[in-house]
Image: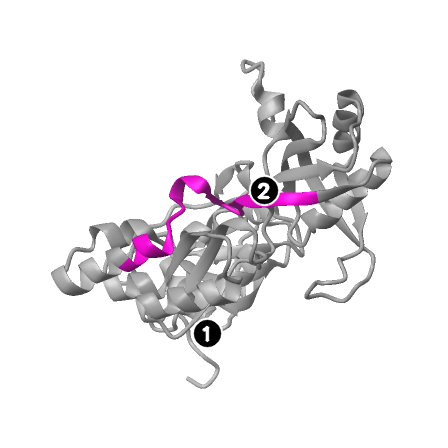
Amino acid sequence: MNDNNDPNSDTKLKFKLPSEIERELVHRSSATTNPNYGCVPRERSMRDYIEMGVVNLDKTRGPTSHEVAAWVKKIVEVDKAGHSGSLDPKVTGLLPIMLGKATKAISALRLSGKEYVCLMHLHKKVPEADIRRVCEEFTGPIYQMPPVKSAVRRAIRIRTIYYNEVLEIDDAGTSILMRVGCEAGTYMRKLCHDIGLVLGCGAHMQELRRTKTGPFTEETAISLHDLMDAYVFWKEDGDESELRRMILPMEDGLKHIPKIVIRDSAVDAICSGAMLAVPGVVSFNAGIKKGDYAYIFSQKGEAVALCKAAINIDESLSKNTGIAAVTERVIMDAGTYSRGWKSNKT
């Protein structure tokens, strides 16, 4: 709902990714958490912090996304590292990289919305009014055929453009700077080509930078050099401060996903693959519908598992029995919390 006291609220909402729209947290019941089990994400030991962390890397021109992920893996000495969605070698910008155990949640970032700042070059001058009108038309669901050089099968697909804002047009009227918020898997090169076709002049993408991916923005972006320096400071001098600033808890990479918070007594059962029963729910984001994906969190803010809602979660307020969600992918290790359930074998 827009703030009626803010005349700019409609504009602010217009240029937001779906992940940036705040969700109401509904409290179903009260519960306490035992300090002897689990840990607030930012208070994990340094090695655990790294193994369950995410680096919001600012990729430079030149290397591939896979090369950058491999370098990060080597720098912080983890067995696994996965990136949030490929950027072409010539493209710069945000490339969040999940580390170690956090790679279990990488799909949450790969499927998140993205924002790009794109420089599009028109092959001949077109009236400014036409440029702005056509760019505005390329919002909402659009059809795209992946380029010939792409990592996916070439077939018509639908992708959503959340906003397409013309930031600047040069004096010649052929260089257009745009800010585009879009669904994961949208090809910006193809978007520029299609805009050129509609304008009747032809166009191509000249430069591209990713400025948002899911909950990550340029404000927390770091370079490979910064990461390496911070890791060396920790290894040689025991100074954790910079490294804890460079690496973020993996939970920061899940903020854009609907969440369900559960009781301590339910955590270990979920870690063993059990379904989430309604009595285990403490709070949840409003509006989670049956079949929607959500992340289950402990009361300390730790990611426990990815789940699929088995009911409209809002209905759990009026229920005391039944299944609220089905566990899809466990993130937390079993045994992190005290076992509060019995198996059929005992």
Write down the quadrant of residue 160 in the picture. top right
Horizontal relation, residue 85 to residue 249: left or right = right
Q: Real-space Cα distance between discs 2 and 1?
A: 37 Å
- Residue for badge 2: 115
Mark 2 surroundings: few (<14), some (14-19) or many (≥20) residues within 10 A? many
The residue located at (77%, 62%) in the rendering is 148
Q: Position of residue 238 (x, y in %)?
A: 14, 60
- Tell me which residue sits at (34%, 73%) in the image: 335
Task: Work out whether residue 86 or residue 35 is closer to the camera in this orientation and state it.
Answer: 86
- Asked which secondary structure carries label 1, the reply is loop
Q: Is residue 213 magenta?
A: yes
Q: In the displayed image of the protein, which residue is found farthest to the bottom?
A: 345
Task: Please report whichever mark, 2 or 1, sits nearer to the chain's N-terminal start.
Answer: 2
The image quadrant where one finds the C terminus is: bottom left
| Three-letter amino acid code of the residue under disc 1 | Ser
Check disc 2 and give the amino acid type: Glu
Considering every residue shown, the one lying at the far left of the view is: 237
Q: Where does the image place residue 244, in percent across and percent down from the top left? A: 27, 53
Across and down, in percent, residue 61 comes to 50, 53
Indicate left or right for 294 with 192 as reference: left
Q: Would residue 63 be seen by someone viewing this image from the given angle? A: yes
Task: Answer whether residue 332 is visible to the viewer in this image.
Answer: no
Judging by the rendered image, the residue that carries numbered circle 1 is 272
Question: What span is colored magenta in the figure?
Answer: 205-228
Of residues 229 and 243, which is closer to you in this image? 229
